[in-house]
Amino acid sequence: MSETILKATNISKVYGKHKALDKVSVEIKRGMIYGLIGENGAGKSSFMRVIMGLISIDEGQIELFGESGATGLQRARRKMGQSIETPALYPELTARENLRVQAANGGVSEREIDDLLRLMNLENTGKKKAKNFSLGMRQRLAIASALITHPEFLILDEPTNGLDPSGIVEMREIIGRLVTERGMTVLLSSHLLDELSQVATHYGILHHGKLISEFSREELADQTRQYIELETPEVQAAVVVLNELGIRDYEVVSERGINIYERLDDAAAINRSLVLADVDVTRIGATRQKLEDYFLQLTGGTTHA
Ligand SMILES: Nc1ncnc2c1ncn2[C@@H]1O[C@H](COP(=O)(O)OP(=O)(O)OP(=O)(O)O)[C@@H](O)[C@H]1O
């Protein structure tokens, strides 16, 4: 991962008196899937629009594919696709027919339509017209339309919004494929950290127009790591047993609570040892910090994602 695809520096956007973006800096390298997370109104769409050149900025610099300045950015944006302003889907046409029209509009060949239909899990939609598609199918068709011109960098605004759990999983898989099969770079947004948790390689948390935190997938996994949650009225006695079992990576988190960060598959055996030592256990089990709790922690816990 070396080439910088997007370098946005100190981007600010003001609507009247409202600062929708406040000195936002983001760097995206080739092959990254960058997830922009923020509650409604945090500025996600504004940032994406700014990057695509759909709205102007009040402050800051944008560099795309190493290019800057009006002409350079215009050239660079030809290598980009987006689903911010969803291309009009023709409701009376099938998925294939829609893509044919998009190919004609984009002045590109129809050669890849089959591959795009497969990539987007739309190959079996046959004669079904777009007006009869589910929301997930419509979103996938919109992405297929954005891909018809072979973009290297794709911007997707809330691609999982409104989808049911299986639709979300499908969308995540598809986005993963864009990177593995097509070598693309993706910037996408969601108001839920959890929805992008298994797809993005990097995250930026946007809150009231400010980028308040950035972390990688690995850092997120560390922050929200799995542990065994042990609840007992006899914390001191339990600690003695844990030490006897050779468990070192644990933390007493409350008067009745201990989090154990190792031997995650051994909760039953740990429970047996505690009971044998006459330590009351009111609850024991593997758990993981909820991503949305982590999000609230980052944003100050005052708002809901
Ligand atoms: N054209 C506009 N004129 C005035 N205010 C705007 C305009 N577009 C956006 N805003 C305001 O700027 C802020 C950021 O909006 P933006 O759409 O970028 O947020 P978002 O994170 O994408 O939220 P959502 O998920 O609701 O789309 C919001 O307070 C919004 O009301």
Image (cartoon, helix red, strand yellow):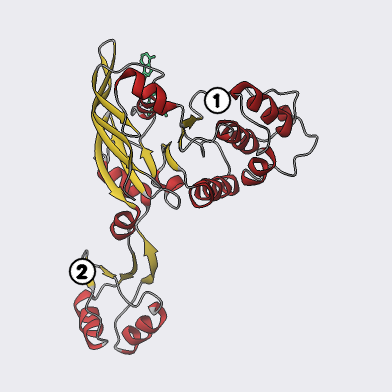
Residue 252 - label: 2
Q: Residue at x 59, y 45 (%)?
A: 167
Which residue is nearer to you in this view: 294 or 139? 139
User: Which tag, 2 or 1, sits closer to the chain's start?
Assistant: 1
Please identify the quarter of the rendering in which residue 214 is found.
Answer: top left
User: Badge 1: how crowded within 10 Å, few (<14), some, or many (20+)?
Assistant: some
User: Badge 2: how crowded within 10 Å, few (<14), some, or many (20+)?
Assistant: some
**Quarter of the figure that contains the C terminus:** top left
Q: CA distance from mark 2 to mark 1?
A: 51 Å
Which residue is nearer to you in this view: 206 or 298? 206
Q: Residue at x 80, y 35 (%)?
A: 127
Q: Is 91 left or right of 186, judged from the image as shown?
A: right
Where residue 28 appears, as percent x and y from the top left, is 33, 40
Work out which residue is located at the far right of the displayed protein and give it.
127
Which residue is nearer to you in this view: 262 or 173? 173
Which residue is nearer to you in this view: 280 or 74? 74
Which residue bears the numbered disc 1? Answer: 86
Where residue 202 appears, as percent x and y from the top left, is 34, 47
Q: Is 188 left or right of 224, judged from the image as shown?
A: right
